[in-house]
Amino acid sequence: MSRTVETAGIGLAQATVIPRSFALYGDSDTLRVRWFTEGLRRLMIERGYHEIPEPGPEVQVVLNRIDPDRPRPYRRKSAPTFVVALADVGEPPDDVLRAGYPLLVRALANLAVMVSDDGAPAAHFVTLEQGRYVVRHTGDDDEFFAGVFERMEPLASSRLVIANEFRTDLPEVLWGGDHHTRQIRRAGEHLDALDLLPAAFPIEDILSERDLRHVKLLYGIGGLSYGNASARRTADGPLGPEFWMSASGVDKSALTDIGKHILLVRGFDAERDTMILSIPPDVKPNRVSVDAIEHWMIYNEHPEVGAILHVHAWMEGIDSTEINYPCGTVELAGAVAQLVRAAPDPGHTVVGQRNHGLTITGESLDEILDRIDGKLVRNVPMD
């Protein structure tokens, strides 16, 4: 058996980040950006953040002040570094997502904040998961920047789990998959028929090949389609529950190849924040979906859960997470797992991820799709 560890980039797994530290970067210096940056900087220092004069691999948060017409990315050396792109957009954008998402990916940021003013300042947030919301100035600077900080800080302090260790020890009998992987394939085809897979933006068209590779390494996303599906294979493997799961950055409507499109998750190494995966030999694998840590938590705690489906849609009357944590973080996984734990029937429940979508548990993917048939609302409510 051979092992290959793919981290979030060269040297990124070894980087040591100073907790509660931040640095300024970028060359945009409009009066509005200067006012916003200084207000946020002052509050962060008051809340215990240490300002580092020059950004580097040790800094936790980088505030990158960008020109919206020519956004200059901050090319971090450490995946734990959280980058906020700050842009002066003048008038409030008509479509926050379409205005902010290209800025977000071109700046290689985790979060974009567009500052506008139509008589009163406002901060419009856009996340990698397509979440968007606004904090408006109501006459008090301290209250405004406190609102901005409360939206930003939980995301900036969250912990990504996107490293994968690939072990070429998948039994030959599974190289072609099994009935669980066929369920995952059918689920992808079903979601495609419901038009729930396409990415909001063709990231491949927005970014250069070099920047696209950087985004994939940093966040574990590919941009081809959204959503994911998994199915439990065993209740207790050597490293805990084992489950098949769709890969990151692949077309979910055509999940055909084991190791490339569907992977077997063997376990989670908490010391290295790494998912352990079993693949066939002589396969160049894709990384597993960034939500693997969330699915692992749920399978680990609820043996009655046989499958999990994640879609970018909504259902009425469900409980949802309170904070828009990034996908692939321990914090989001824990928040979703807590909702599943609190549900009357954890094995058959639907919970929401605020400003993002749904996590649905069930006996099998076929059972889940039958249970939610006709109940999904395509547009996820944003606040």
Image: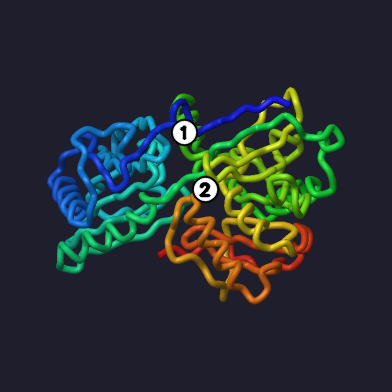
Q: CA distance from mark 1 to mark 2?
A: 15 Å
* 214 shown above or below 245: above
Q: Which residue is mark 2?
A: 328
Query: Are there few (<14), some (14-19), or many (20+) residues within 10 Å of tag 2?
Result: many
Give residue 204's position: percent from left, percent from top: 51, 33
Name the disc covering residue 66, or none: none
Q: Is residue 130 left or right of residue 369?
A: left
Q: Kindly check if marks 1 and 2 are in contact, taking CB atoms under 8 A apart as contact.
A: no
- The image position of residue 174, as x and y in percent, is 83, 38
The residue sitting at 49% across, 37% down in the picture is 203
Q: Quadrant of residue 266?
A: top right
- Nearer the N terminus, badge 1 or badge 2? 1
From this view, report whether residue 177 is shown above or below residue 90.
above
Q: Is residue 73 visible?
A: no
**Residue depicted at 52% across the width and 32% down the height:** 7
42 shown above or below 251: below
> SS for tag 2?
loop
Apparent side of residue 260 relative to residue 57 in the rendered image (left or right) = right
Residue behind mark 1: 13
